[in-house]
Image (cartoon, rainbow, N blue to C red):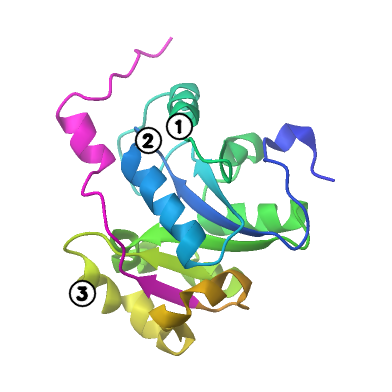
Amino acid sequence: MIRSDTGLPPVRAGLRVGLLGGSFDPPHVGHAHISREALKRFGLDRVWWLVSPANPLKRAGPAPLAERMAAARALVDHPRIAVTDFEARVGTRYTAETLAALQERCPGVRFTWLMGADNLAQFHRWERWREIMARVPVGVLARPGLRIPAQTSVAARAFRAARLPAADSRLLGRADPPAWCFVNVPMVNLSSTEIRARGGWRRRAPG
C-alpha cells in the first residue's frame, strides 16, 4: 500500500508506468502530446508527470511548485496520465534518487523513464546517469532537429548494445534494464523556454 503522503496516483504491482520528469515551467501541449505517444509506443499502462521542485542543471529557479502543479493538472485531459509532486514530498533531488524512492514505495511496478531527444543528447551530464539506465528502461521521443545528436551522444554509444529497435518499441515497458528505445513521433515544436521568453507564463512574485 502506498502511503498517502507520497502524493502518488493509485497503482498496483504489474502496471507499466512511464515517468516524465521536469520542471514543467510551464507545462504545455507538447508534454501532453509526448505522454500520449509514450503510452502507445512503449506499451505503457500509465504516465506520471513528476513535477520537480527545481532542475539541478538550471541556475534560475522555476515558478512556485504549487502554480506548476495546478497548471499541469489543468492541462492533463487523459485518464491514464497523472501529475505528482512526489520529489518535493520525499526530498529527492536527482533522478537516480527519485527512481530508487519510487521502486522502494511501489514494489512490482514496472517503471520506464521518458525523455525527449534533447535530454538524451546531454544525458551523460546527469547525476548517476549509468545508475538510471541500470534501474529502468528508458524511452526516448524524438524532437525536431535533435535526432542525430541524440543518437550519437555519449549515453547512446555507451549503451549501444541495450538499444531496442523502434519496431519493437512496445516491448520497452516490460523490458529488463538496461534497455532503451528511440522513436520518431510527430512532434509539437514547442518548449517551456520559448513560452517564458514570449511572456506566455506569468509567475507570481514569491511571498
Tag 1 secondary structure: helix
Please tell me which residue lies in front, 92 or 69.
69
Dominant secondary structure of the residues highlighted in magenta in the image? loop
Please tell me which residue lies in front, 71 or 119.
71
Image point (34%, 84%), residue name: 157
Is 43 located above or below residue 171 in the figure? above
Asked if one can make out residue 11 in the rendered structure from this viewpoint, the answer is yes
Question: Could you tell me the amino acid type at mark 3?
Answer: Ile
Which image quarter: residue 59? top left
Image point (16%, 31%), residue name: 197
Q: x, y (%) of residue 80?
A: 58, 46
Q: Which residue is mark 3?
A: 148
The quadrant of the rendering that contains the C terminus is: top left
Q: Say left or right for 173 vs 107.
A: left
Upstream in the sequence, badge 1 or badge 3? 1
Tag 3 secondary structure: helix
Q: Which residue is mark 1?
A: 72
The magenta segment is 180-207
Q: Which residue is mark 2?
A: 27
Upstream in the sequence, badge 2 or badge 3? 2
